[in-house]
Image: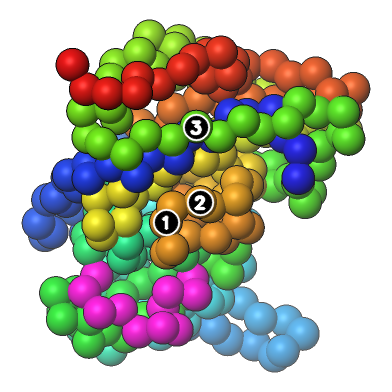
Amino acid sequence: MRRSLASLALGSALACSAASSPQAASRLGVRPDPSVDTIRGTVSVVGTATDERVMIRPLGGGPAIPVSGTVAKTLLLVSGADVQASGRRDAAGAFDVREFVVRSVDDVPAIDGTLVAQDGGIAIMTTDHTTHPIANPPPALRAHVGQRVWITGPLETGAVTFGVIAPAAAGDAAQRPIDLPPNAPADRPKSVDAKCLLDAVHQAMAPYVAQAQASYPAARERFRAGLPPGHTFFVTTRLHDAAGREEQVFVIVDSIVNGIIAGRIASQINALREFRYGQPYSFPEAELVDWMVSRPDGSEEGNVVGNFLDSYTPPSSCT
C-alpha cells in the first residue's frame, strides 16, 4: 500500500520503561469539579425492551435517580455495576451524566480504563494516563485492545474478570477505512540494529518531533470538527515489544478522548510479532511522534518527521 509517512523499523535492544505501580487514587477516574454534581450508586435498567430507562440507585439509600443524556446509552452496558458519575440535574429532575467511572462490580473493586498494547503485552490505561500492566491476560481480553473496559481481580496474575464499556472507542469524529489517493508518495522504511544507532536517530529526530507536537493541538481540533471528504488524519508513534525492539509506525485516528488517541495501525509491521497492520491501538498524546493529514489530490499536511526521515541516512556505526 502506498502512503506518505516514512516508517522507521528499529531492531535495537532498547530498554523498556517500567510502568508505575497501581495506586488507589488512580482508580477514581472522575476528578472533582465544583461546577458539577456527582453521584455514586448502582446502575439499573427499567422499562420494556422498546422503552428502556437507566437509573442510578444511590449507595446511601433513597429513591433511584433517572439518568438522561447521551452517556445514558453507555451506562446500559454496565447495568448492575457500582459507578461514580458526574453531571447536572436537568429541568425534568433527571441526572444528565457527563462522565462516569466503574468503581466495583459484584462488590469487587474495579479499574476502568482503555486497554493498550505495552511492551509486548497489554495494560489498562486510566484517565490520568497511568498504565497498569496485566500479567497473563486471557485471550478474550486481548481482543479488546483500544476499547474501554472494566476489570476486576489481581492484574499481577491475570486472573481477572472484565466487561466492555465501549465496544468501539468513543470519539468525536471516527473516520472511514484508510483513504489514500493512488498518487500518494510511497513509504521508505529505514532500520538500525544497535542501541547506540537508535539513540543517534532519536537525537536527530528530536527537533522535528518537538515541531510536530507543538502543531498537533490545532490539527486535533480540526479532526474533531470534521475533516473534508477524502482527507485522512494519521499520527505516528513508537511500538515496543518484550525483547526491547522498537518500530515507528503510523496510526489512522478514529477518536481522541481524554488525551487518549485511539485508532488502527496503518503500517506493515516489520520487526514486532505482537503487532499487525489494522490492529486497534491506543496511546496517550504524550507518545505522539508526528501527525499528517492526507489529501485526496495526493498532497499532505504536517508529516514533518516523515519528511525529515525521507532524506535522512541513519549512521552505519557507533562512534
| Residue pictured at 45% horizontal, 40% vertical | 9
**Toward the viewer: 76 or 288?**
288
Magenta stretch in the rendered image: 134-144
Evaluate if marks 1 and 2 touch, with contact meaning CB atoms under 8 Å apart. Answer: yes
Q: Is residue 220 left or right of residue 111?
A: right
Q: Secondary structure at mark 1?
A: loop
Q: Using the rendered image of the protein, determine whether residue 307 is visible from the camera's viewpoint.
A: yes
Q: Using the rendered image of the protein, determine whether residue 61 is visible from the camera's viewpoint.
A: no
Which quarter of the picture shows residue 207?
top left
Q: Secondary structure at mark 3?
A: strand
Marks 1, 3: nearer the viewer: 3
Which quarter of the picture shows residue 28?
bottom left
Is residue 143 a member of the stretch shown in magenta? yes
Dot 2 crowding, Cα within 10 Å, few <14, some 14–19, many 20+: some
| Residue pictured at 47% horizontal, 60% vertical | 275
Q: Find disc 1 in the rendering and name its residue.
A: 272
Place of residue 86 in the rendered image (x, y in percent of width and height, measured from the top left): 39, 52
Q: Find disc 3 in the rendering and name its residue.
A: 190
